[in-house]
Image (spheres, rainbow, N blue to C red):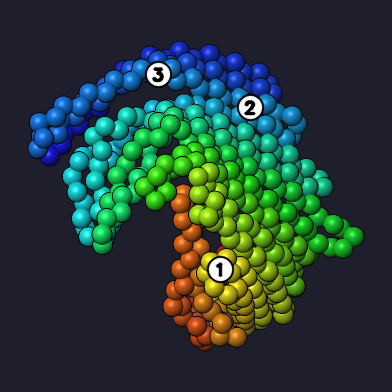
């Protein structure tokens, strides 16, 4: 039904500069791409030539030992796939039919990434920061056309799509309390035109997450950690305020391991997930409590006999929430509930060190 040829010519020049603390690469490229297609069943020829300037920058600067900043910027041309181009109905699912669009043009994408790392090997304090930005001109997205008993999806070009993401992590020990702390936050923003109920509208999306972890430093006999997280997803639409979506998730968790003379290990942990109600009905609170006891046997502790109990409270319910461009999906999965398990593990290589939780993870 459809044939496609994609050919491009690229001419590039680059400048490299290196010193003891700085590395810099600047590149400029000219790319001419030609995409020719033939809709055989309709006797239609498609010709699309694109000429683009593609700059690229890579920068790294050392601010000290384990302390640096990195920046990467690049551009690219992304041609549509054969599936997106060929005007053939895919009715594998009769209620969700897809048809390609031979009039698609390539995307022109800008990507920017910024990394910051600062780790003090003496105090064990660390800071990690990350920022990314992506801007796509002629972004390829899907338009949904609803008909009686079915819906038809087709790929089309929109003016642009903007995506911003950032994260920040800070970790430090508190020696006076014998603990370590770690806090991480992530933020995201998206903007661009989409199709909602067959009509083009502007979308603004926001998402974020904050997570706190506290754990003990000396894990020879006792290993514990506890923490929690909170996150949100929000979608707003310029021409239809009633179609806006939002949901919030919270989670609390705690784990405890006690090792007795590197021979017996007792582990237990609990996590509690909170799912806000929004349009999904009542708020869901799901506690999952697990526990196990292990006995290490044989020479060099190569053997481990373990008895485990999963979901002691018998509350397991698989819930998954997904946010897309124009809807939020809430899935409840029939999950395996409470169960007991007796297992035996044999390590082919002897394990040294203590029987701490970290050591056990290497054994399995």
Task: Look at the numbered disc 3 and give the secondary structure of its residue.
Answer: strand
Task: Look at the numbered disc 2 and give the secondary structure of its residue.
Answer: strand
Real-space Cα separation, disc 1 to disc 3, in angstroms? 54 Å
User: Which one is earlier in the sequence, the residue at label 3 or at label 2?
Assistant: 3
Nearest the viewer among 218 and 311 is 311
Residue at mark 3? 52
Residue lying farthest to the right in this orientation: 176
What x and y, as percent, mark residue 245? 54, 56
Residue at mark 2? 60
For the point 71% across and 77% down, which residue is it?
Answer: 258
User: Which one is earlier in the sequence, the residue at label 1 or at label 3?
Assistant: 3
- The answer, for residue 357, to whether it is visible in the render is no
Please say if 324 is above or below 309: above
What x and y, as percent, mark residue 232? 62, 56
Residue at mark 1? 363
What x and y, as percent, mark residue 243? 50, 54
- The answer, for residue 101, to whether it is visible in the render is yes
Label 1 packing within 10 angstroms: few (<14), some (14-19), many (20+): some
Of the 4 image quadrants, the one containing the N terminus is top left
Counting every numbered tag in the picture gives 3
Real-space Cα separation, disc 1 to disc 2, in angstroms? 39 Å
User: Which one is earlier in the sequence, the residue at label 1 or at label 2?
Assistant: 2
């Amino acid at each position: 039904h459809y044939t496609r040829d994609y050919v491009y010519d690229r001419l590039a020049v680059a400048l490299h500069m290196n010193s003891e603390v700085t590395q810099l690469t600047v590149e400029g490229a000219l790319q001419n791409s030609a995409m020719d297609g033939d809709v055989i069943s309709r006797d239609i020829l498609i010709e699309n030539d694109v000429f683009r300037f593609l700059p690229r920058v890579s920068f790294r600067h050392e601010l000290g030992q384990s302390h640096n900043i990195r920046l990467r910027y690049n551009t690219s041309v992304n041609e549509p796939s054969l599936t997106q181009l060929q005007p053939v109905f895919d009715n594998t699912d009769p209620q969700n039919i897809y048809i390609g669009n031979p009039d698609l043009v390539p995307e022109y994408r800008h990507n920017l990434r910024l990394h910051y790392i600062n780790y003090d090997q003496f105090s064990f304090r660390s800071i990690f920061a990350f920022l990314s930005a992506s801007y796509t001109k002629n972004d390829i997205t899907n338009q949904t056309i609803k008909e009686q008993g079915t819906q038809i999806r087709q790929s089309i070009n929109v003016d642009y799509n903007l995506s911003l993401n950032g994260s920040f992590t800070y970790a430090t020990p508190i020696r006076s309390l014998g603990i370590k702390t770690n806090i991480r936050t992530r933020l995201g923003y998206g903007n661009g035109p989409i199709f909602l109920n067959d009509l083009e509208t502007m979308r603004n999306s926001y998402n974020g997450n904050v997570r706190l972890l506290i754990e003990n430093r000396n894990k020879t006999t006792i290993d514990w950690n506890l923490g929690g997280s909170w996150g949100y997803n929000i979608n707003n639409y310029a021409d239809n305020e009633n179609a806006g979506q939002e949901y919030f998730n919270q989670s609390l968790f705690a784990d405890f391991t006690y090792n007795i003379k590197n021979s017996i290990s007792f582990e237990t942990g609990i996590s509690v997930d909170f799912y806000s109600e929004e349009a999904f009905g009542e708020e869901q609170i799901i506690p999952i409590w697990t526990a196990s006891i292990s006995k290490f046997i044989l020479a060099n502790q190569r053997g481990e006999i373990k008895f485990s109990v999963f979901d002691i409270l018998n509350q397991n319910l698989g819930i998954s929430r997904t946010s897309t461009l124009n809807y939020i999906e809430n899935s409840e999965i029939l999950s395996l509930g409470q169960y007991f398990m007796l297992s035996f593990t044999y390590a082919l290589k002897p394990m040294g060190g203590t029987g701490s939780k970290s050591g056990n993870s290497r054994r399995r």
